Amino acid sequence: MAMTNEEYAKEIKKAININRVISPKRMNSLLDLKFLDCDVEKKSASFLFESKECFTNPYDGVHGGAIAAIFDYAGGLLSLVVGRQFVTTTSLSTSYLRPMNGKKFRVDIEITHIGRRMSNMYGRIYDMETEKLCATSEINYMITEGKAMGLQN
């Protein structure tokens, strides 16, 4: 049975909360992504990232490593919810198009493929004030055998 948009949103929020409870001091929790919207038919979701000083580079923009981590985490969340199994990143290619000097960013992720062993995502980050595209990424994950905690329905 296919998920509704409401069920999809609920599962994404649940995955974010599980991460925060289990590992509040780890990178994914510190990024503090917030759910904005989703489309179950497109297998996509949008998140809010609010920059913090700990994620900035010497030029007061978001550090490139933090940008890659944002893509990795957001894509992993979607893969986890749709595939219902843990994933591990196999490759991540990020293009940094303009400095992320703002404070609030929209992270859009869509699943381009999900199979039995691999899932592929495409992501975009936009500055919410200027609406300009700042970065894009292609992320690939290997789906592991273990079922994701809390998502075993």
Image (tube, rainbow, N blue to C red):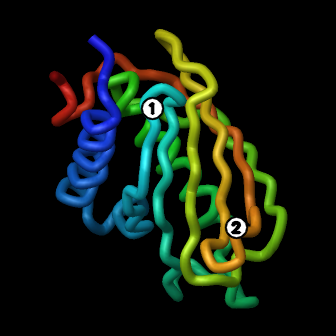
142 sits left or right of 129 in the view = left
Residue where numbered disc 2 is placed:
64
Question: Which numbered tag is attached to residue 79?
Answer: 1
The image quarter containing residue 107 is bottom right
Q: Residue at 38% across / 56% down in the picture?
A: 35
Q: Nearer the viewer, residue 124 or 147?
A: 124
Residue at the extreme right:
97
Comes first in the chain, label 2 or label 1: 2
In the rendered image, the vertical position of residue 83 relative to residue 1, given as above or below? below
In the rendered image, the vertical position of residue 63 relative to residue 71, given as above or below? below
Secondary structure beneath disc 2?
Answer: helix
Q: Residue at 50% across / 52% down in the picture?
A: 46
The image quarter containing residue 82 is top left
74 sits left or right of 4 in the view = right
Secondary structure beneath disc 1?
Answer: helix
98 sits left or right of 85 in the view = right
Residue 93 in picture, x, y percent from top left: 74, 44
Q: Amino acid at mark 2?
A: Gly
Q: Quadrant of the C terminus?
A: top left
